[in-house]
Image (tube, grey):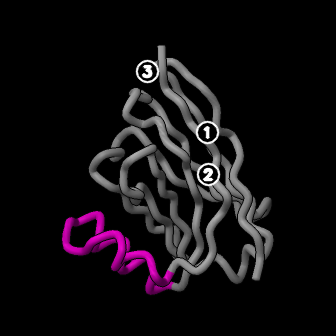
Amino acid sequence: QGQLQESGGASVQPGGSLRLSCVVSDYTASRYCMAWFRQAPGKEREGLASIDQDGDTRYANSVKGRFTISEDSANHTLYLQMSSLRPDDTAMYYCAAGTSGACITIQRYYAGRLDLEDATPKFGRWGQGTQVTVSS
């Protein structure tokens, strides 16, 4: 299976912006559903945003209006543009790729109808993560 590699994590001040990238080695095969997650120390993993093969994007309420997921198919890259960053956005950020069914289940999670544990089994590939720290 192909690899996912995140980059772009950094330390920023509250209110700042950051763009994360995720290069996907077998982009065409991964294109069914791709998403961003994060996990802060001592906290459970959290789903943030997803994009399906038709380009439909969905977001968790915690980041809606502040984060934007997008893709550059020519460069095999998934992005997460983050703005108005807050200290509670501090976490390790991960990208993931899965089947088309993965986007259906993660959308149920965003709507509060499914636990993340039940929403993520169809995401079969994950990156190693990139650290984002928001602090003054």
Q: Amino acid at mark 1?
A: Arg
Crowdedness near tag 2: few (<14), some (14–19) or many (≥20) residues, C-alpha within 10 Å: many
Q: Are marks 2 and 3 in contact (CB under 8 Å)?
A: no
- Residue at the spot of label 1: 19
Q: Amino acid at mark 2?
A: Tyr
Write down the quadrant of residue 85 in the picture. top left
Question: Which residues, given as a range, are shown in magenta?
Answer: 100-122
Crowdedness near tag 1: few (<14), some (14–19) or many (≥20) residues, C-alpha within 10 Å: some
- Residue at the spot of label 2: 79
Task: Assign the magenta stretch its main secondary structure.
Answer: helix
Asked whether residue 21 is drawn in magenta, I would say no
Label 2 vs label 3: CA separation?
A: 19 Å
Which residue is found at the position 50% from the left and 84% from the top?
Answer: 100
Left/right of residue 17 with respect to residue 114 in the rendered view: right
Q: From the top left corner, tell me how far across and down residue 81 is, in percent.
A: 54, 42
* Secondary structure beneath label 1: strand
Q: Are marks 2 and 1 in contact (CB under 8 Å)?
A: yes
